[in-house]
Amino acid sequence: MTPEQVKEDFDLAVKVVEAGLPDTTWFQSERAWRLAKEEAHQALPGIEDAQGLFRTLRPLLSRIGEGHLALHRSPAMKRMDRQGQGLLPLDIHWTEGGAWIERGWGDAAFISPGTRLLAIDGETADDLVRESMAALGHDGRIATGAMREAGGAGYAKVRYWMRGGARHYRLRLQDAAGAINEMVVAGMPASARPAQTASEESPLARLEWLDGRTARLVVPTFSNRRYREAGSDYQAVIGQLFETLRERGARNLILDLRSNGGGSEGNENYLFSYLVRDPIRKYASVEARDASLSVADRQGRLYSVEVFDKQELATQERLPNGHLSRRNEPPEGLMSHWERRSPVFDGRLIVLAGGETFSGAAELSSMLYHVQRGLFVGEEVAGAHAGNTSGYTWEVRLPNSGMVLHVPLLKFRFAWDDLPLGRGVPPHCAVPPDLPGTSRDSALEAAYSLTLMPWTVADPPACPMHGSDRATGPWHDDAGYRVLPRSAGR
């Protein structure tokens, strides 16, 4: 790419983001955004190819804190990734308490699974998580989503994107006995790593009975498309499962949202209505910049998108800032649901959630947390408690690099602010994900143990960590126990 082509793609990307996102400064100040753009712009003269542009543009977009904002690598870049040399020969398991080796390859094949990773080339695990957040995007200031996406071989890929390959890597490790040692391992070709395979989990919600009064409800997705492809219907499945809970007299329900990345708008509300009888005001607003949007690049080429058609536009009203917002009228509006549902499940609720709980599933988590319906077990939810920008998307291919920008166009701002801005729902009982390949499900074990204790949401029990991986960070004290913010009203 010539310097002019680099600048053209960069300027177009920033224009589209600022024209499409209703708010680029929700999770950062206007000054911070301006300075970040200036710093990125100063780096442009040294960029010679699409890879270099990605390394500058993706972190700039990530700092906005909108996890639905995506920058997809071009087909040519993906071919180069598959031919890459000098990749990190490690699969890594990340938690809020640290990083562990899942598996080593090549020179690192002898490293035992479960060995703690303290540093790579002198950079700590926290440094590497921040790099992953810059390369992958995230909601607000939440790290758990990037941790899940960078799990396994994910971080080796991220590191290659952001730095290229290396001949050697210096690892600082801690074994099970607590001994710390350093070693140097060689980088490896991307072709020597086996391809990661996607999970074949059924998309359909299902019940598992743990005892005569306790059931686990697994809801892997809210996507209507995935239900249709499976020959089923989301609302029919959910309705039947709750009827089964009623018929069998369940008193404890463990709602498992750990693998739910969202899906079709409204399906989170439908599930909420079976858990909370009375409707609540969910959104303060659902905001878009305008009914249609357009920008021109440096060559005068026009890029445009229609946000609302004529029928949809009739459901919008103009805000004082000139943007459009959804009217609070059925069938969508701003409410969780419009009519009291009867019967509902009124027993005790425990929610399993974490870094893969995103979009609509994060919205459901925020709704339940806000009304104090249930205890949360796992890790911080990946979606911001304040809301998100998602819904309709503006897709723009950058003309010179071939990268494709996906800009979400609807700002779903929740009608509450009972957590720090930019954070997700925290767990009452913090249990990090188990190392892949182990047979344990510590979070589920903790959730089930809670069903055997007396508690209310207003008076939750103390929850010590399971195993040696104590959680630390903004939601935990030095002993690994859950600490609720004062504003949460617990």
Image: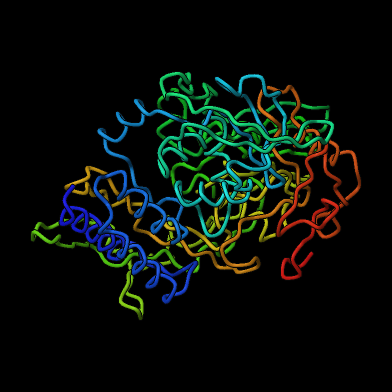
Q: Residue at x 73, y 31 (%)?
A: 247
Residue 412 position by quadrant: bottom left
Against 264, residue 65 (above or below) is below
Taking the image as shown, residue 49 lies to the left or right of residue 464, namely left
Q: Residue at x 55, y 52 (%)?
A: 130
Q: Residue at x 36, y 26 (%)?
A: 82
Tag count? 0
Residue 415 position by quadrant: bottom right
Against 285, residue 123 (above or below) is above
Q: Nearer the viewer, residue 435 or 185?
A: 185
Residue 234, image x and y in percent? 50, 34
Against 490, residue 273 (above or below) is above
| Image quarter hosting the C terminus | bottom right
Residue 308 appears in view: no
Q: Nearer the viewer, residue 153 or 176?
A: 176
Residue 222 appears in view: yes
Residue 147, image x and y in percent? 58, 43
Q: Nearer the viewer, residue 446 or 244?
A: 446
Residue 139, image x and y in percent? 51, 55
Q: Residue at x 59, y 36 (%)?
A: 170
Residue 237, image x and y in percent? 55, 31
Say how the picture is coloured. Answer: rainbow
Q: Residue furthest left?
A: 300
Taking the image as shown, residue 280 lies to the left or right of residue 85, namely right
Q: Nearer the viewer, residue 180 or 94?
A: 180
